[in-house]
Amino acid sequence: MNTTEEKDLINSVEAGEWTSASNLNSMKDRVVKAASETALKDYRINIRISKRDVEALKTKALEEGIPYQTLVTSILHKYVTGKIVEKK
């Protein structure tokens, strides 16, 4: 971890500015279920994505307590199965 944003986040956590979500167990269960639904990883892809988007994904994954690659896989799975739809 070497970005200013990451250091600010660490300092914020260490200063006690964060608390667990009241529905943390429910959130974890939801993410674990999504991860298990996408557990069959038999194909690799490479994509180019902006640094800002990657940092945002890492932050969201940290909030969920999962690796960011797992979050990306879960989001893609939900999109292709119709569980996430684009706003019009």
Image (spheres, grey):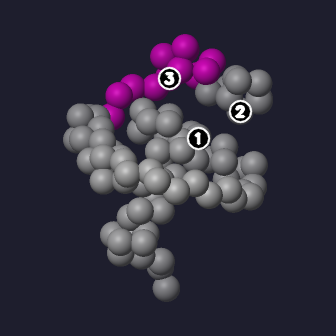
Task: Tell which tag, 3 or 1, sits nearer the viewer.
Answer: 1
Q: Amino acid at mark 1?
A: Lys
Q: Amino acid at mark 2?
A: Glu
Cβ–Cβ under 8 Å for marks 3 and 2: no
Q: Dot 3 corresponds to which residue? A: 17
Which segment did they paint magenta?
10-21
Res 47 → quadrant: bottom right
Cβ–Cβ under 8 Å for marks 1 and 2: no
- Residue occupying image coordinates x 70% and y 24%: 1
Q: Dot 1 corresponds to which residue? A: 58
Q: Amino acid at mark 3?
A: Glu
Note whether 2 is above or below 79 in the view shown. Answer: above
Residue 86 in the image: x percent, y percent?
A: 47, 77
Left or right: 36, with 65 as reference point: left
Q: Dot 2 corresponds to which residue? A: 5
Label 1 element class: helix
Residue 14 in the image: x percent, y percent?
A: 55, 14
